[in-house]
Image (cartoon, rainbow, N blue to C red):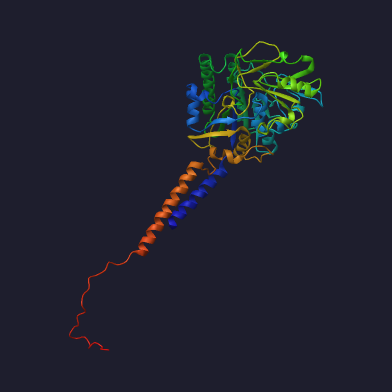
Amino acid sequence: MSSMLILFFAEILLCCAHSAGDSVPKLLLVSFDGFRADYLETYKLPHLQEFIENGVLVKEVRNTFITKTFPNHYTIVTGLYEESHGIVANDMYDADAKKNFSQFNDSDPFWWNDAVPIWVTNQQQGKGASAAAMWPGSDVKINNTTPHFFMKYNFSVKFEERVERIVEWLNSSDPVVNFAVLYWEEPDASGHKYGPRDTQNMQRVLEEVDKHVGFLMNKLKASGLWDTVNVIITSDHGMASCSAEKLIVLDECLGRNNYTLIDRTPVAAVLPRQNKEDVYNLLKNCNSHMKVYLKEEIPDRFHYRHHKRIQPIILVADEGWTIVQNESLSKLGDHGYDNALPSMHPFLAARGPAFRRGYSHGSLANVDIYPMMCHVLGLAPRPHNGTFANAKCLLADQWCISVPEAIGIVIGVFMVLSTFTCIIIISKNRVAPSRPFARLQLQSDDDDPLIG
C-alpha cells in the first residue's frame, strides 16, 4: 500500500512539473459560416472526420436568436445573448444615435462596445497577444483595442492566405500570440445560392471546405504547432431550404409609407412610422406563416427583448418561408429563423492538449463556448450568459460524468453494497449443524457424579 501511495504522489509531482514547464496555452477558433450540423452526416468529409476522431465533437450547437451571421459570431466570442452584446441583426438602426449599421458598414466602435470580445480580454489580462483573420468585428477598435495582428475584411482574400497569416502569427515570438480567430464565408454563400437540399452542388462546396480543413491541419503540422495548439472548428448557424411558393408579401398587407424595414427576412425588424398598434394589427393578419411580435411580447426563450436596437415590431417567418415587400425570391437557402429549429444549428469540433480524445457530445449552447475558451487560455471571463459546467465534458483536465454513466455507477455501487450486506447477514445467521444424541459415557478415572 505504501509503495502505491508513493507512486501516486510521484505522478502528481511529475504532472505539476510538466504543467509548470508548459508554455502559454494556445487556441485557434475557426468558423466556417453556415455549416449546418447534419452536413457532417450527409457528406463524406475525410479531413474533418480525421480532426474529429482525435478530438471532441458536439453534434449540435444551439445558437442564439436571431440565427444570423454577425449576431452569432459576436455571441461566440463574448458568451452573451444578442440582447446583451448589442449586435442584434446584420442590419440595425439606433434611434438615439440616429445611426445605421450593415454588414458593409460595420467599423464604428459604437455598435460593438456593449461587450468585450475574448481577443480584447486576452490582451488586457496579459496572457499574450491576439490575432484575427476576417472574424466579424475583429478589425474594429472595441474597448479601444484591436487584436495585435488582424486583417481588414476582404472576401476576395483566399482561405489559404488567411491560414498562412494565422499560422505565421501563432508562431510569433514578439509578441507571443496565444489566441487567434479565423473566418471563412463557405458553405454559407453556396447554401444561400443552391439551398441545402441541392446535394450535388453542396457536395462540391463541402468537399472544398473539407480540403480547407486539411490545408489548415497540414500547415499547423508543418509549422510545429499541431501538437501544442488547441483548435476549435464551429459555425454561426445552419441553413434552411426556401421556395418561391413560400413568400410572405408585406405590400399585400400594408403600405410602405406606414413603416421602415430595418432588417429583412426571415426575421424582419419593423419601425412603424404611423400608429404602432395599427401597423401591428395589419401585420398580425397578414400571413399565417409569419409570427408578429410587439417588442414586449417576444418570447423569453429568444433572449431578444431587452435592447434599444430591437425594433418595436419583429416578424418571424416559419421555416422555409421568406418575407419580402414585393420582390421575387433571390435565394434558395436562408437562415435567421427560430433557433429551436435543427436546421439552424451548426456543430463544434475541437482537438488539442486541452481537449479529450474520441469523445462525442450531444448539444451545447454557443454562449457556453466563451467560458470554455477562457478556461483553456487561463483567462478570468467577463460577465456572460454561458455556463462553464456545460462544456466541462469536452476538456481533458475536467472530471466529467454523463447522466447514464452516473446512473450505472449508482446502480453498480448499490448492487455491490447489497451483495456485501447479504453476505454479512447470512454469515451471522449461520449455525453449526446439529449432532446426533449420544449418552454420556463415564470413564473409569472420572470422579463419581453428583447425585442430587
In front of the other: 418 or 333: 418
Residue 161, quarter of picture: top right
The residue that appears at 64% across and 31% down in the rendered structure is 76
Taking the image as shown, residue 342 lies to the left or right of residue 450, namely right
Taking the image as shown, residue 197 lies to the left or right of residue 91, namely left
Residue 130, quarter of picture: top right
The residue that appears at 46% across and 54% down in the rendered structure is 6
Taking the image as shown, residue 367 lies to the left or right of residue 254, namely left
In front of the other: 199 or 232: 199
Q: Quadrant of the C terminus?
A: bottom left
Residue 336 location (% of width, % of height): 64, 23
- Whether residue 118 is visible, yes or no, is no
Residue 342, quarter of picture: top right
Q: Is residue 202 above or below residue 61?
A: above
- Whether residue 339 is visible, yes or no, is yes
The residue that appears at 63% across and 38% down in the rendered structure is 371
In front of the other: 315 or 113: 315
Report the number of discs.
Answer: 0
